[in-house]
Amino acid sequence: MAEDILKEINTRLTRVETLVEFMAKSINEVAPRLSYLEKETERQKDSLKVAHNRLNDMDRRFYWFVGISITILGGIIAKIWG
């Protein structure tokens, strides 16, 4: 009886060891890809920030241009009708 229990424990430990080895191998294979993806994500984040800043600058220039145009046009209309 004790011998059967020891065989069962040995069998289960062997399966666990096999699974741990497989998982370790999988992690070692995936680690470089994860590192690359982390760097790429960081690069994309920086790129997105730069694009967002460019859009904000374009937005400010557009509203500045519209404001100046309305001011000039208002001045012209005021002189014509004034």
Image: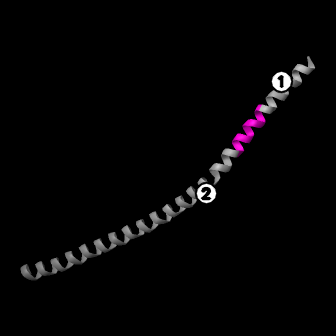
Q: Quadrant of residue 12?
A: top right
Q: Image quadrant for the N terminus?
A: top right
Q: Quadrant of residue 22?
A: top right
Q: In the rendered view, does 29 fall on the left or right side of 58? A: right
Under circle 2, the secondary element is helix
- Which residue is located at x 54 percent, y 62 percent? 42
Identify the residue at the far top of this view: 1
Q: Which residue is mark 1?
A: 8
Q: Which residue is mark 2?
A: 35
**Tag in front: 1 or 2:** 1
Magenta stretch: helix, strand or loop mostly = helix
Pointer 1: residues within 10 angstroms few (<14), some, or many (20+)? few
The x, y position of residue 40, in whole percent, is 53, 60
Q: Please name the amino acid that badge 1 sits on.
A: Glu
Nearer-the-camera pick, 17 or 48: 17
Say if 43 sits above or below 77 in the image. Answer: above
Q: Which mark is first along the chain, 2 or 1?
A: 1
- Which residue is located at x 84 percent, y 27 percent? 9
Q: CA distance from mark 1 to mark 2?
A: 40 Å
Span shown in magenta: 15-24
Magenta segment includes 21:
yes
